[in-house]
Image (cartoon, coloured by chain):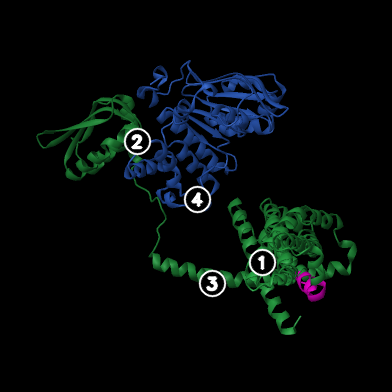
Amino acid sequence: MSAAFRIDLDGDTLRLNAEGDWRARFLSAIDHEVRLFEEDSVGRELVIDLSAVTRLDTAGALVLQRVMSACASRTEISRFVGGSDAHQALLERVAPHLAPCPVEPQRGDPFIQMLDRLGRGAADAYFTALKILNFVGLVLVTGGRVLADPKRLRMTSIVRHMEDAGLDAVPIVATMCFLVGAVVAYMGAKSLAMFGAEIFVVELVSLAVLREFGVLLAAILLAGRSGSAFTAQIGSMKIREEVDALRVLGLDPIEILVLPRTIALVLVLPVLAFIGAMTGLLGGILVSWVALDISPALFLARMKETVVMSNFWAGIIKAPFFAFIISVVGCFQGMAVRGSAESLGQRTTLSVVQSLFLVILIDSFFAMFYLEIDF
Amino acid sequence: MAAAGLEISPELRTGTARETAEPVIRVRGLRTQFDDVVIHDNLDLDLMRGEILGVVGGSGTGKSVLMRAIIGLKRPSAGSVKVFGREFYALNEAGRLEIETRWGVLFQGGALFSSLTVAQNVMAPIREHLNMPEALARDVAAMKISMSGLPPEAGDKYPSELSGGMRKRAGLARALALDPDIVFLDEPTAGLDPIGAAAFDELIVNLKTSLGLTVFMITHDLDTLYAASDRVAVLAEKRVIEVGPLDEVTQSDHPWIRSYFTGPRGRAAHHTAVR
């Protein structure tokens, strides 16, 4: 039987007869009525009769005590009657704990909040830029010091990161660039066919793949695979106080953690970019052959004729810069992890977003620069 | 209700938490392992209604694993775990859920949901399992928070804003949200300062007597053991080697028990408890 109650009037005194099972799961049905009764009878004398209550838990006792404290005027008459010892004890047990507590933090005006977030965001962006710049300087200075004394280079660590970030990334970089090269050729083929200029697909594919897509796709993959991994690795070391332990032992975390990763990336990204450019060309050549009847021999001959070598270098030169910024941002965000695992997650996301943003930004600077110097 | 005979009557639940002979949890022949590493083998343990059972053992003896095996987080490879007389691992989804709403667990770090405030944490099980109006759920949450010894202002704080002791109290409030019959505590006083730890011991005993709780408490803390536990179970050699009231267990000849209770820390805790 679920919870129920009846109200009787005994002279001036209200009498609430509670019945049945007053446990939490049965209270939903009557809570509303109980509250209405509370509002109607503020300041009245109230006797609550528990003799028909079969079961009671803390939630039920809470509701009964709430009724009592809401309506009863504090006289001798207002009281609980008819409850077993256990029920009485439970009622007494919950009596001191009736005060409500806030559930959500107070939030102000949503408009002000929006302005607040906007301001913080702008200030954050500025200070983050400064901090990353500071970190870049720190890595360069440490790098210079270590290169002056090359036996301090951690070769094992460098080679390991080269394998993780470079060798292991070859299949995915090759596949992606192959596909993008093929897609560019397809798209070009359709538009160029309208002018009967299908043969220009050679220039289109080789310029796009050599100057931009090879290196850019390799950099994007590196930011996703390795930049985020650096943040997670260094961040979890930070949480476990390993970074502090290094400092206390007189070792430089930049030299031990950041430099090998950065050197490894700077060495492998040009290679990945080269592989990307070659597989991208391969994709383009295959599509031209199948869809446009431009034989590989013709493709290559035309490429040799019209596409100058500088296009290849224009792509590859960018690779070390991209690698440097990806590694520095990844390590910077790792070092910025504070305390909780939640912060680690946020930092890893930030690391990928910022390094991609910076890679594209630097890429556009290079594009403008090349335009100016006519490269 | 299927387990009507084992439902805890309100008379027994409140005020008069007498120890009866009836175990609410009965573990027999339990074997747990991670791949080839056997943690428990042929382990027997009873948790009696209305008692506080302190579970002790050296590091790596599988105290937490035992708790996880009982509450369904680590499936044993052999043996039986009976909760309220029913074989826990043989139950279907509904049966399990029914039992799961009748126990509360306080994990070591509190395990509060970090995206919710303390009050929202306490309300989470209430919302999920009881179809309760929001206003009543808030009242109940406020009561549990207050009962766990937290000030009302703690309600709208996020777990990251709380001290270790407050986080444990908030975890306890959530464990008590559904008025459970059994509460599992994993190292409730670990990481608390001595004053906070003593206050927590008192809180546990207090809640046990007033709400008629049965408590399964893993602890390293000898002071807690002396202050709170009715019986002690000692885990070693992959099983429970000794179980009983504290003064009986301390008399055991087993070398680990001897060095645990008669070592310098054991003696100090004993003196404090006697005084």
Chain of the residue where label 4 is placed in the rendered structure:
B
The disc labelled 3 sits on which kind of residue? Ala
Q: CA distance from mark 1 to mark 3?
A: 45 Å
Mark 4 packing: few (<14 Cα in 10 Å), some, or many (20+)? Answer: few
Is residue A182 a member of the stretch shown in magenta?
A: no
Chain letter, colour green: A
The segment highlighted magenta reads: A303-318
Q: Which label sits in the foreground, 2 or 4?
A: 4
Q: Residue furthest top?
A: B21
Left or right position of B269 against A263: left
Which is closer to the viewer, label 1 or label 3?
A: 1
Q: Residues within 10 Å of mark 2 (few under 14, many from 20)?
A: many
Q: Which residue is mark 4?
A: B115
Residue at 42%, 49% (x, y): give it.
B155
Alpha carbon distance from label 4 to label 1: 52 Å
Residue picked out by circle 3: A122
Q: Earlier in the sequence, mark 1 or mark 2?
A: 2
Discs 1 and 2 carry the same chain letter: yes
What residue is shown with label 2? A59
Give how far apart the Cα atoms at labels 4 and 3 are: 25 Å
